[in-house]
Amino acid sequence: MTDKQLFAAVDLGSNSFHMIVARDEHGELRVIDRLRDMVRLGGGLDERGQLDSATREGALASLSRFGQRLADIPPEHIRAVGTQTFRRLKNPAAFLVVAETALGCPIEIISGREEARLVYRGVNRGIAPAEGRRLVIDIGGGSTEVVVGEGREPALAESFPYGCVSETRRAFENGRITPRAWRRASARIQGDLLAFQAAYRQFGWQQAAGSSGTIRAIGKIIEALDPDAPPVIRPAQLAELKQRLLDAGRIEAVSLPGLSDARQPVISGGVLILEAVMASLDIDQLRVSPFALREGVLDDLVGRLSHNDPRDQSVQAMMERYQVDRTQAERIETWIDRALSGIGQHWPLQTIHRDLLGWACRLHEIGLAIAHDQHHRHAAYIVEQSDMAGFSRPEQLFMAILVGGQRQRINPADLKRLPDRLLAPAQHALALLRLALCLHRARRDWESELSVQSDGPGHLRLNLPPGWLDAHPLSRHDLEEEQRQLKRLDVELSLADRVPAT
């Protein structure tokens, strides 16, 4: 039996997998359990985006352990996210099938900026609000996030594709830590940050904080070296760590007080990255946060469940940016909601699928801001490629496929880009969106005249007033074309005269 007071967040990072379980007690979440496995997923990924078999099996074993702990938690109270290494997988769908089976819940692959946003929210849960603005640095196994903001949401958020695992391997080839290798890698990282340096400094901050395992490990080393030092990381302390690493000469020879065996193989890349970022942004001290991505995921999950969903805000902002016809968008969404109320038992779209369909209704015309010709393809590109706060990559792809398939010929291959668990919901959602757009081409309402019924997930019946098709030849032509196109989605559309009420 599930415990409705429990919530869980799973962070599948490039270096380690983490899970926290929290209980809702008097309106506050209290963490009651934590699980962590040092998987080093990023270390098992080659240049072609393929995982080696040992890393893959280790990851699945960890997910199975996590899955056992999640079994008593309501599915809607769980959110699992994959980060940089998942983003780099050549064929993520194939791995997700077995990974989600092992974990027992969907895994969302999030963008770098979404990861940065969630890290910022997590740090805000763990450190009391600063006076003014806050900068957050998060060094993971495969990426580094740099965020500044004020309050609960960031103002600037960037993700850079190097972390402690990937940078240790890249900067120190053959395991040799040399001054020349350090200088070259540091210059490269600071060069990447140069394009963003001015914007961050202009925004400014009153407090800088660091999160995740690498920065916490550096903080523990500094504390072990000087127990009387303030609980912050300063450039001079990083310079000392750098010299100790250079003196070691090789990755396997690194030995520092307070450094765990699990963190030892990747600490060199972590120190290198942190030193470069602090130098680039002229940070004089960095406070260590006990909270990171997983706490941000938990915070965001609770926000979604309490109707404070950042995805709504993202969609609203995009509608404004691309000057969407809100009346038409609302007309389409309202008609689909009414249709679903009549066919829901045969078309069992879950809440998340209905939400994604609703957001697709609001965004389906954003491509008109670029050009009328092929506007659905422009819309699909924008939705899929934009950084949309709160959305995972599969969610954006789901919406992009809907808006991209809203008109003209349906290409079933487009839907196969989705994870298998989203394929049937996408087919149903796309069929409803196309039918709604077909009926509302003239941008007028048909609520009182048309209704939809279904005898099963593969069938739709549109009930029409007697003689309606003859009176609307353009709609008749469009509906007959839809009958042909929807067959590509394995949906049979029938047109029937509605029997007048007696």
Image: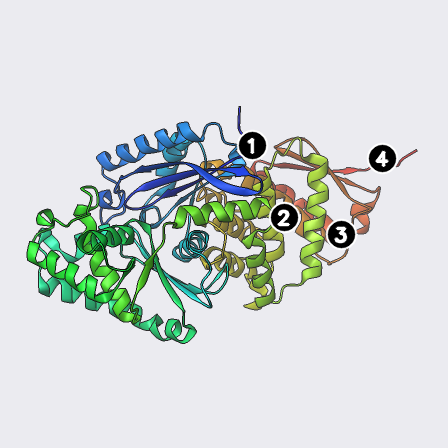
Name the side, left or right, on which 18 lies relative to 244. Answer: right
- Judging by the rendered image, the residue that carries numbered circle 2 is 434
Is 448 in front, or is 5?
Answer: 5
* Image quadrant in which you'd find residue 247: bottom left
Q: Quadrant of the C terminus?
A: top right
How far from the left and from the top, in percent, is residue 462? 73, 40
Disc 4, disc 2: CB below 8 Å? no
The circle on residue 499 is 4
Residue at coordinates 40% horizontally, 32% vertically from top-left? 103
Indicate left or right for 113 with 345 as reference.
Answer: left
Q: Amino acid at mark 1?
A: Lys
Q: Earlier in the sequence, mark 3 or mark 2?
A: 2
Q: Earlier in the sequence, mark 2 or mark 1?
A: 1
In space, the residues marked 4 and 3 are separated at their CA atoms by 21 Å
Residue 108 is situated, as x and y percent measured from the top left of the image, at 44, 44
User: Of callouts 4 and 2, which one flags the residue occurring earlier in the amino acid sequence?
Assistant: 2
Query: What's the colour scheme?
Result: rainbow
Tell me the residue that label 3 is attached to: 473
Under mark 2, the amino acid is: Arg
Amino acid under disc 4: Val
Question: Mark 2 or 1, which is nearer the eye?
Answer: 1
Query: Pointer 2: residues within 10 angstroms few (<14), some, or many (20+)?
Result: many
Tell me the residue that label 1 is attached to: 4
Q: Amino acid at mark 3?
A: Pro
